[in-house]
């Protein structure tokens, strides 16, 4: 009797397990980060942990850097005292706009697509990146790579 009940119990557990598939839940690639007025001049790191991005405001507008080193994909650190991003893996350095200037990184870090929704909030789309491949024209001035006049 115990063997029968044990078998039935195991089968019931296997049946219930069917409703909880082993799935990996990736972070969203399109999300809101707030209003342009939420971002002052310089580098904002508050979304680094959740979305692996930095939000930057400069004299031209607001853009979003994908926080992935273009050497081998580590996440650089923002060093405010040195005014640069520094990759902990092999020492690549990037200026506050994500442009590489030291170490083995072959090109600047990519930027994510940004736009305003009807309510005026910034929508970031990490599935659409702008890059500046070595020897090719920069895409950083393309529509969607930066929010100007905000
Ligand atoms: S992964 Fe950043 S320098 Fe190598």
Image (cartoon, grey):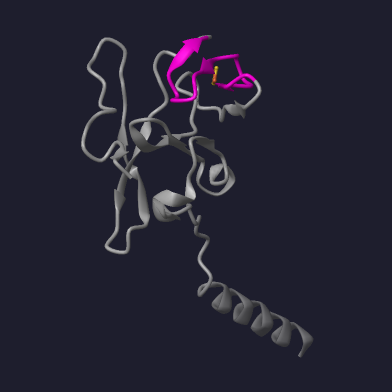
Residue 48 image point, x, y percent: 55, 42
Whether residue 137 sits left or right of residue 129 in the image: it is left
Q: Is residue 83 magenta?
A: yes
Magenta-highlighted residues: 82-102
Instruction: Give me the residue at 50% from left, 19% from top.
Output: 94
Main SS, magenta residues: loop
74, 2: nearer the viewer = 74
> Against 50, is 57 above or below?
above
Quadrant of the displayed image that contains ligand 1: top right
> Against 128, is 68 above or below?
above
Which quarter of the image is occupied by the C terminus?
top left
Whether residue 2 sits left or right of residue 43 in the image: it is right
Residue 81 image point, x, y percent: 66, 23
Residue 72 image point, x, y percent: 50, 22
Which quarter of the image is occupied by the N terminus?
bottom right
Instruction: Give me the residue at 39% from left, 16% from top.
Output: 107
Instruction: Give me the residue at 33% from left, 58% from top.
Output: 120
């Amino acid at each position: 009797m115990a063997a029968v009940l044990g078998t039935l119990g195991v089968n019931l557990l296997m049946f219930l397990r069917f409703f909880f598939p082993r799935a990996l839940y990736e972070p969203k690639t399109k999300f809101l980060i707030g209003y342009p007025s939420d971002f002052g001049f310089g580098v904002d790191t508050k979304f680094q942990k959740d979305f692996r991005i930095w939000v930057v405001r400069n004299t031209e507008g607001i853009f979003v850097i994908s926080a992935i080193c273009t050497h081998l994909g580590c996440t650089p650190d923002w060093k405010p005292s040195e005014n640069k991003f520094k990759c902990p893996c092999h020492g690549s350095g990037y200026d506050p706009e994500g442009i590489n200037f030291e170490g083995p990184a072959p090109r600047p870090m990519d930027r994510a697509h940004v736009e305003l929704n009807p309510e005026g909030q910034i929508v970031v789309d990490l599935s659409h990146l702008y890059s500046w491949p070595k020897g090719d024209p920069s895409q950083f001035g393309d529509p969607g790579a930066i929010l100007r006049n905000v």
